[in-house]
Amino acid sequence: MTGLHRLTIEEAALGLDRGEFSAVELTRGVLEQIERTEPKVHAYLLVTAGLALEQAQEADERRRRGESRGLLDGIPLAVKDVIVTRGVRTTAASKILANFVPPYDATAVAKLKAAGAVLVGKANCDEFAMGSSTENSAFGITRNPWNLQRVPGGSSGGSAAAVAAHQCLGALGTDTGGSVRQPAACCGVVGMKPTYGRVSRFGVIAYASSLDQIGPIAKSVRDCALLLQAIAGHDPADSTSVDRPVPAYLDAAGGSIRGLRVGMPREYFLPGMQADVEEAVRGALRQLEELGAEVIEISLPHTEYAIAAYYLIATAEASSNLARYDGVRYGYRAPGAESLLDMYRKTRNQGFGAEVKRRIMLGTYALSTGYYDAYYLKAQKVRTLIRRDFAEAFRRCDVIATPTAPTTAFRIGEKIGDPVQMYLSDVFTISANLAGLPALSLPCGFDGEGLPIGLQLLGPPFGEIAVLRVARAYEEATGWHKAVCPLAGDGEARRAPAAR
């Protein structure tokens, strides 16, 4: 059957249940799309075709026996290559882990397997999830399916590009400062960062442990809710995992938003922001008002300090987390070392890329004697102020709406030589990680060059239901998520109407 790769998770699950096609046929359709488009996009570091077909066959056999595991049974998904997979190479897009084959699954992966999902491959990303463009991968850049001369965003750019190019029906990414939401915006798909602690981090190759969170990327809000439902929940293997009941997210992704209060922070509409982005987001706010929501202006006064605080906290934690990659226990070891110290130096110099080295050095400096209080400790105090800003704002509103990024996808190579400009790509997403809040990006239009624009919705801690409800209401009213990129299979981009 043709066109199966274009289905949403919900549509595919319905077709499988009705017997319109098999999981093997669905998976083959996705693998064929990967074969057609992957030479142009490079969304994957590893395509697990054989494993995927085996898992799809098992799903079909379960259905024949009447033992279907639910809406993800037989659904082809991708997983970002910083999330470990038992027996499947996991590199974090770094030479230092080029041949690492984990002996266990991340909890989120184990949950997807328990739900019957099919793993089609490991998605490319910025090395150790450090970047906003997926240009920092040691194994080549990923390109945006909407325009192959543009970045897909980062660091989960491979996951977002794979979903946008219909190389999978959904994917997992990780979000430390916007790394699910920003690429989702750049690629015109839906991406969500859950509340910190809502999804287990066990099995995530750590970047910044107090900020990292696994999140779903999908073609629709309801698909995003489905994936979140599958991976959420308490995990004793993760001390930061919260022991709290998991709501029915799919049920929440629908219904009226009449009477809900949507906060619009004045600090998120900056001078110099791309005009098309501001226009599209303000148009989205008007659409929410037409749907019955009340849009009110709010203030998050410490927003201007978020970038500085984030890049102190995240790099400090990276410096600590990446100390384990020393060539002793596993991973790459540089040859020809004359001493233990020489082996450490050569291994880390040859194994890490430029951006990872930069962040390790920044973090080590911030933690060094005489500078800890001046930098790292002060950044943690600013983090508290940012969290308090949000707590105060959510006394007045149910969700907060902002642009996901200040611009649409920029050109490949445009910012790679200017780290500060690259870091500013995450100016609207970082605060949610510092405060541990749930946040979602969904499409809200296109710029003049046909590139997708993202609307970000944030909720209070464990407020995923409100975020999903507002996102789904907007999605249904506008249909931007139905837009099709040129690589979807017919060679022609199609946009959805702005509103019904």
Image (tube, rainbow, N blue to C red):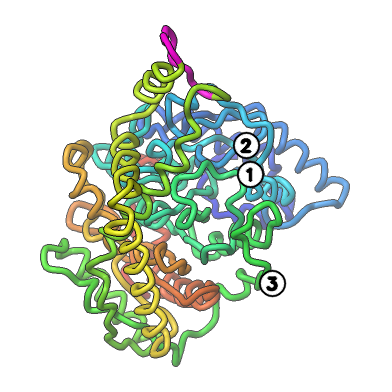
Q: Would you say the residues marked 1 and 3 are in contact, meaning their CB atoms lie under 8 Å apart?
A: no
Farthest-out residue, front: 370
Q: Where the N terminus falls, by quadrant?
A: top right
| Mark earlier in primary sequence (1, 2) | 2
Disc 1 packing (10 Å; few <14; some 14–19; many ≥20): many
Q: Tag 2: residue type? A: Thr
Position of residue 459 measured from the top left corner of the image (x, y, whole percent)? 45, 75
Q: Tag 1: residue type? A: Ala
Q: Is residue 96 left or right of residue 224?
A: left
Q: Which residue is mark 1?
A: 106
Residue 245, numbered circle: 3
Position of residue 432 measured from the top left corner of the image (x, y, whole percent)? 40, 66
Residue 315 or residue 9, whichever sits in front: 315
Q: Is residue 468 left or right of residue 407?
A: right
Residue under the image location 18 percent in, 64 percent down: 276
Q: Main secondary structure of the magenta part?
A: loop
Q: Is residue 250 above or below residue 492?
A: below
